[in-house]
Image (cartoon, rainbow, N blue to C red):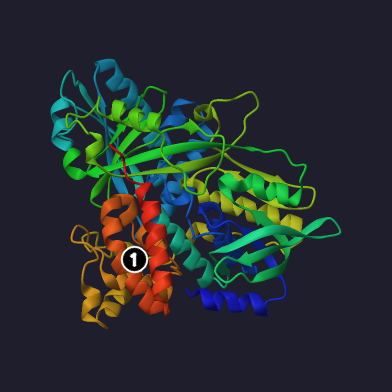
């Protein structure tokens, strides 16, 4: 997957069937669905794939236990089914994750135990593990960091885990394999109209400044928290429909929460659940639900959110996590669709919404990573009707995502490359220096930087350290230490000069400092 080849297609194709704006989970899923049905598909993303919300999740593929408690049975059933499909179609990026839910009263243990048993039964044939009620002794064997005092036992249940940014990238590669075109750093600045109907877009290549007029039979807006921006491009009288909600995560070393079991805290100060989840050798703790007035490209954790996470997680752990223990903090924005009369984002629905404007612009927003495939299918179904395209059935329920392989060796540091792992290792053989680690605290090697440039459309140091490998999200200081070598490798591979290298380092350092937790 090379950006130059993708740009060449823009010069040769006169009209597309479907143009998709937005390169996050929903946009990439929609492009994969459309391309795999055989439609001429183009996706444009103004930054990098999954730069926003779609790389900042809690890394869970789940039905949503909280939605079950709220009585949203439809969403839970849908998400549990999609969880099973994703685990099957992307085994290199997903895994079954056991969870414990500690309980501090006998009635709470059985209350949550019955609820989670129902959650398990609702997954039917796609169930991934049997829910069990456990004694306090067994809970502490599984998770020795859990607070001991008055512990009455708990529940063991199972959900899915994944790498969000890598899944987004592999979806982009799947689109290309299916004949579609995907481009990062391509900003859409207007909707193209013919007789009042949306018939394409105007875009600018953010790396070269070149502008494009691109025709299509239908346009799909899949821009998440920036949905309103595109709706207002299409119709400047359109009122806003998105109420952004921020969620943050703290990342700490595994010594604070040892073992392979994740933990769910069922009740926090604001009624949300909180998770502590092992991921890439660290532990992610989150998340929050804070209404924000403005959707930012690089949101920052608020002090009250940080204190909320500390306050709630330390009630359930005996390890006493402090600010000094946090390796990284990251924030993401949820594109919640406004509910009439509802101001609290925590109570707004997580279901997705599809809107077709007067001009025929198809907008899909809301939802979550777990249900991206179903959202994409419905978006394309609507687009076919609007664009008067020949109807073809979706095939993504059984479509293997790029990198799929039958056997995944989780002990291999390159396992999340799936079928590409052998090629990355072969690339490392070209240069002995490329076998070296980028940082002594992480297994990432220099060959992965070269691979990201050659095959994964990485254009900046941030693209590599944030999303091609996940070092920025795991340890911001380590990522800053690795950045000079990443910049050097990229500059050499891409033929960039010293000015480019220094600009990249300056930009990345400023970004990474926002992932550090001040004392």
Quadrant for residue 116, please give it.
Answer: top left
Q: Quadrant of residue 185?
A: bottom right
Residue that sits furthest to the bottom in the current view: 430
Give neighbour class at mark 1: few <14, some 14-19, many 20+ (Cα, 10 Å).
many
Is residue 299 something one can see in this rendering? yes
Q: Disc 1 marks which residue? A: 417
Up-down relation of residue 427 to residue 261 (above or below): below
Question: Quarter of the image holding residue 412?
Answer: bottom left
Please report the residue visible at 65 percent of the width from the left and 44 percent of the height from the top. 228
Q: Whole-percent x and y of residue 370?
A: 46, 47
Name the residue rendered at 54%, 42% in the picture: 367
Relative horizontal placement of residue 20, taking residue 443 as reference (left or right): right
At x 50%, y 47%, the residue is 371
Picture coordinates of residue 209, whole percent (x, y)? 61, 69
**Where's residue 29, x and y in %?**
53, 57
Residue 357 located left or right of residue 69: right
Where 311 sits versus 391, above or below?
above
Q: Give the camera-side residue of 267 and 314.
A: 314
Residue 426 placement (x, y as % from top left) = 28, 79
Q: Can I make out residue 406 in this image? A: no
Q: Vertically, is 123 above or below 152?
A: below
Image quarter where the C terminus lies is top left
Q: Is residue 13 left or right of residue 159?
A: right
- Secondary structure state at the residue bearing disc 1: helix
Q: Is residue 243 above or below residue 212?
A: above
Residue closer to the observer: 152 or 492:
492
């Amino acid at each position: 997957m090379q950006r130059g080849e993708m740009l060449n297609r823009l010069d040769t194709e006169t009209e597309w069937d479907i143009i998709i704006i937005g390169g996050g989970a929903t946009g990439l899923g929609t492009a994969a669905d459309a391309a795999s049905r055989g439609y001429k598909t183009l996706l444009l993303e103004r930054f990098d794939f999954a730069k926003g919300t779609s790389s900042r999740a809690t890394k869970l593929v789940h039905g949503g236990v909280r939605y079950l408690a709220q009585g949203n049975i439809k969403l839970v059933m849908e998400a549990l089914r999609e969880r099973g499909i994703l685990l099957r179609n992307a085994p290199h990026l997903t895994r079954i994750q056991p969870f414990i839910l500690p309980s501090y009263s006998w009635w709470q243990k059985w209350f949550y135990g019955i609820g989670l048993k129902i959650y398990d039964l609702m997954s039917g044939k796609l169930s991934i593990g049997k829910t069990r009620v456990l004694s306090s002794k067994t809970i502490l064997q599984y998770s020795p960091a859990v607070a001991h005092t008055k512990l009455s036992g708990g529940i063991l249940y199972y959900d899915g885990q994944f790498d969000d940014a890598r899944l987004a990238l592999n979806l982009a590669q799947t689109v290309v394999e299916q004949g579609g075109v995907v481009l990062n750093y391509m900003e859409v600045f207007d909707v193209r109209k013919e007789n009042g109907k949306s018939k394409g877009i105007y875009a600018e290549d953010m790396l070269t400044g070149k502008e494009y007029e691109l025709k299509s039979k239908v346009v799909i807006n899949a821009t998440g928290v920036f949905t309103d921006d595109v709706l207002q491009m299409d119709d400047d009288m359109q009122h806003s429909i998105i109420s952004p909600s921020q969620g943050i995560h703290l990342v700490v070393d595994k010594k604070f929460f040892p073992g392979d079991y994740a933990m769910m805290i069922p009740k926090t100060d604001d009624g949300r659940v909180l998770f502590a989840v092992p991921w890439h050798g660290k532990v992610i703790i989150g998340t929050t639900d804070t209404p924000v007035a403005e959707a930012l490209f690089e949101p920052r954790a608020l002090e009250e959110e940080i204190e909320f996470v500390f306050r709630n997680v330390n009630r359930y752990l005996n390890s006493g996590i402090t600010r000094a223990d946090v390796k990284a903090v990251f924030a993401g924005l949820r594109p919640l669709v406004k509910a009439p009369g509802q101001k609290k984002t925590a109570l707004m629905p997580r279901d997705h919404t599809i809107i077709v404007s007067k001009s025929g612009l198809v907008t899909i927003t809301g939802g979550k990573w777990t249900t991206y495939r179903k959202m994409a299918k419905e978006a394309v179904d609507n687009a076919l009707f609007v664009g008067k395209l020949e109807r073809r059935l979706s095939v993504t329920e059984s479509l293997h995502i790029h990198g799929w392989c039958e056997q995944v060796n989780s002990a291999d540091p390159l396992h999340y490359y799936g079928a590409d792992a052998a090629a990355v290792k072969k690339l490392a053989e070209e240069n002995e220096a490329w076998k070296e680690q980028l940082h002594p605290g992480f297994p990432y090697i220099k060959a992965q930087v070269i691979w990201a440039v050659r095959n994964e459309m990485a254009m900046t140091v941030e693209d590599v350290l944030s999303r091609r490998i996940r070092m920025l999200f795991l340890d911001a200081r380590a990522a800053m230490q690795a950045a000079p070598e990443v910049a050097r490798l990229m500059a050499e591979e891409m033929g960039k000069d010293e000015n480019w290298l220094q600009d990249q380092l300056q930009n990345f350092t400023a970004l990474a400092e926002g992932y550090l937790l001040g004392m």
